[in-house]
Image (cartoon, rainbow, N blue to C red):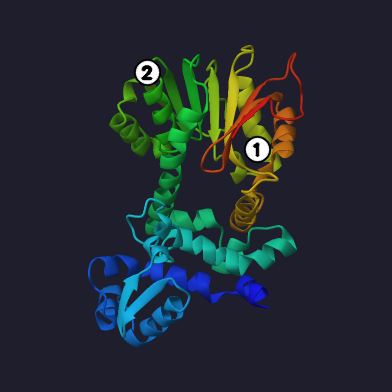
Amino acid sequence: MNDIRQRIDVFTPIALRVAATLRLADHIVAGTTKLDDLAGAAGADPDTLGRLLRFLTCRGIFAEPEPGHYALTPTAGWLCADHPSRLREFLDLDSVGGLLDLAVCGGLLATVRTGQAGYAQVFGRPFWDDLADKPDLAASFTALMTAVSLRLGPEAARGYDWTAVRTVVDVGGGAGYLVSEVLRANPDATGTLVDLPGTGPAALANLAAAGVADRCAFAGQSFFDELPAGADVYVLSHVLHDWDDEHAVAVLRRCAQALAGRPDSRVLVVERVIAEDEHRPLTTEYDLRMAVIFGGARERTYPEFVALAAAAGLAPGEVRNTPSQHWLMSWQPVSGLPTGGEPGHRLS
């Protein structure tokens, strides 16, 4: 009975997000430990905040060393703004991370019933339309994606063999954090960052800050259009999971066209992969999250990536794993090579 009650618990996940939004852990670290003072600092009703803290302390998330005074536990430390996980940013209900959590809670049923994005069912319009009209929301989404890129960029730079690579195109590379890390680790390489024109100013600023602006061009365009040709590696990081199969194949096909006639060139796909491993609970969660927010978007299994690549004229090569549960999947022109099967090489 206790196990099922834990699994159906609604209040603990929401209560944690409310605590993160109110920045309770940061206020306590700063020395604000008394209930009335905490309520003032957090902009909360003292009585209801006390009830929230009572709920969380009896679950071991905060501590109450004396009546009406609160302290952190190791668990609550994860809610601090300076925690390396940056978990608070993902839980903040006033930011895009918390908003997406609310969309999942309210929209999953609609998505399962219809296959369409449940986000619009909850908030009245698609996610991208919401972002376009709400600058604060768009800024928090950028910050969230930046947090992911700052972690993933160094992993991609270390996890793939860039030794013989002289030219790299980061397709849909956003603000350029990944390609910056790759170029910093490979001083003889040059790059091109491909993304929509609106990302240009931030991308160019980041490339300059990383000291690689003189070695990386910016191409302001859609990745559904013809890509700059002739590079050694075309990177697609966190791109394909945003799209249904038809659009994902279209992006891969553009990459395959760009490396045509260069049998040693590769497409490097960086994504979470649903596999029979210890990360399966997390990847299946992200899969449902993508469905609720974007509709046709999805996380995929490795055989599903193989099928997409084959439809675009690409065959599997080397596969490596990163510490953040992403796979670095290399794809190469089909001609004279296998068209499917298991990864050519895998490192854990």
Pick whichever of labels 2 and 1 is earlier in the sequence: 2
Q: Which residue is mark 1?
A: 248
Residue that protrudes farthest toward the left in the picture:
31
Mark nearer the viewer, 2 or 1: 2
Q: Position of residue 307 (x, y in %)?
A: 75, 34
Work out which quarter of the rendered image holds the N terminus and state it. bottom right
Q: Which residue sits at x=33%, y=35%?
A: 206
* Quarter of the figure with residue 263: top right
Q: Amino acid at mark 2?
A: Pro
Q: Position of residue 137 (x, y in %)?
A: 41, 58
Q: Position of residue 311 (x, y in %)?
A: 74, 30
- Residue 114 is at least partly visible in this image: yes
* Quarter of the figure with residue 218: top left
Q: Which residue is mark 2?
A: 187
The alpha-carbon separation of the residues under discs 2 and 1 comes to 31 Å
Q: Which residue sits at x=29%, y=32%?
A: 209
Residue that protrudes farthest toward the front in the picture:
65
On screen, residue 151 above or below 346? below
- Judged left or right of residue 320, residue 43 is left
On screen, residue 336 above or below 178? above
> Residue 85 or 258: which is nearer the viewer?
85
Checking the image for residue 1, the label placed there is: none
- Alpha-carbon neighbours of circle 2 within 10 Å: few (<14), some, or many (≥20)? few
Discs 2, 1 touching: Cβ within 8 Å: no
- Alpha-carbon neighbours of circle 1 within 10 Å: few (<14), some, or many (≥20)? many
Q: Amino acid at mark 1?
A: Ala
Residue that protrudes farthest toward the bottom in the picture:
47
- Residue 224 is at least partly visible in this image: no
